[in-house]
Image: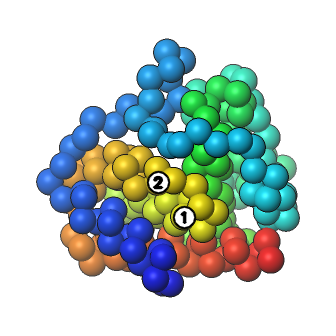
């Protein structure tokens, strides 16, 4: 893990233990948000980087939250759906959501193969695996926010990760394992888009 990513990871981990911060849906229709990003304009450099990845990303007015569809069937799965860009509080919040879903996307069977591809495999990985994968995606998003110079990642990631860590009674070694997997995902994305 490079120094920048290690610093982000350490900052997040230092703020998590014993805290439940009351995560709220960040894309609330009422304009309430836990996100505290600096207002930013659209970033053509980030948009171009995202396009170079080749991920199937679409925007859908009918969804309430961004999702990565990991269905192994190539006709129906392996795609990211986001809520429309104009429903985010600001552009940085939008990129944070994209980065979170792209980190999930790296776990697909044809990339880093982190995700279960059958009910049996999901059972063998245990009931905590989906929460562990969320931790990977959120840490990956925080690392990518830093890579692109977008601010506000730590507070938002802590807000998201604190209840997950509490629910898992997460140990520091497990957190480090999630951090390493997030770092691997970011490395994969950076190399793919290069």
For residue 42, which numbered disc appears in the image?
none
Left-right relation of 136 to 59: left
Left-right relation of 117 to 55: left
The residue carrying mark 1 is 146
Do callouts 2 and 1 mark residues in contact (Cβ within 8 Å)?
Answer: yes
Residue at 40 percent across and 56 percent down: it is 154
Residue 90 in picture, x, y percent from top left: 61, 35
Estimate how packed mark 2 is, as few (under 14), some (14 to 19) or many (20 or more) residues with alpha carbons within 10 Å: many
Residue 5 in picture, x, y percent from top left: 47, 74
| Coloration of the structure image | rainbow
Q: Which residue is at the far left? A: 18
For the C terminus, the image quarter is: bottom right
Residue at 14 percent across and 54 percent down: it is 18
Residue at 49 percent across and 15 percent down: it is 30
Residue 76 in picture, x, y percent from top left: 78, 46
Residue at 28 percent across and 50 percent down: it is 162
Res 88 quadrant in image = top right
Total label count? Answer: 2
Q: What element carries label 2?
A: helix
- Is 51 above or below relative to 83? below
| Distance from the alpha carbon under mark 2 to that under mark 1 | 7 Å
Residue 184 in picture, x, y percent from top left: 56, 78
- Is 12 above or below relative to 63? below
The residue carrying mark 2 is 153
Mark with earlier residue (2, 1):
1
Q: Is mark 1 on a helix, strand or loop?
A: helix
Left-right relation of 145 to 47: left
Closest to the observer, 127 or 104? 104
Estimate how packed mark 1 is, as few (under 14), some (14 to 19) or many (20 or more) residues with alpha carbons within 10 Å: some
Q: Which residue is at the far bottom? A: 2
């Amino acid at each position: 893990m490079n120094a920048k990513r290690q610093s982000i990871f350490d900052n997040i981990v230092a703020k998590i233990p014993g805290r439940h911060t009351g995560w709220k849906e960040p894309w609330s229709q009422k304009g309430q948000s836990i996100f505290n990003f600096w207002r930013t304009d659209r970033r053509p450099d980030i948009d171009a980087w995202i396009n170079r990845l080749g991920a199937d990303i679409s925007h859908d007015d009918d969804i309430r939250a961004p999702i990565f569809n990991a269905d192994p069937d190539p006709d129906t799965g392996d795609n990211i759906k986001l809520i429309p860009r104009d429903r985010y509080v600001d552009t940085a919040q939008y990129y944070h959501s994209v980065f979170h879903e792209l980190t999930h996307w790296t776990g697909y069977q044809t990339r880093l193969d982190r995700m279960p591809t059958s009910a049996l495999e999901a059972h063998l990985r245990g009931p905590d695996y989906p929460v562990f994968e969320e931790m990977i995606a959120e840490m990956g998003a925080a690392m990518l926010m830093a890579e692109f110079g977008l601010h506000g990642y730590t507070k938002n990631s802590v807000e998201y990760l604190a209840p997950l860590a509490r629910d898992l009674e997460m140990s520091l070694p497990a957190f480090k394992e999630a951090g390493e997997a997030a770092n691997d995902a970011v490395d994969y994305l950076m190399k793919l888009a290069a």
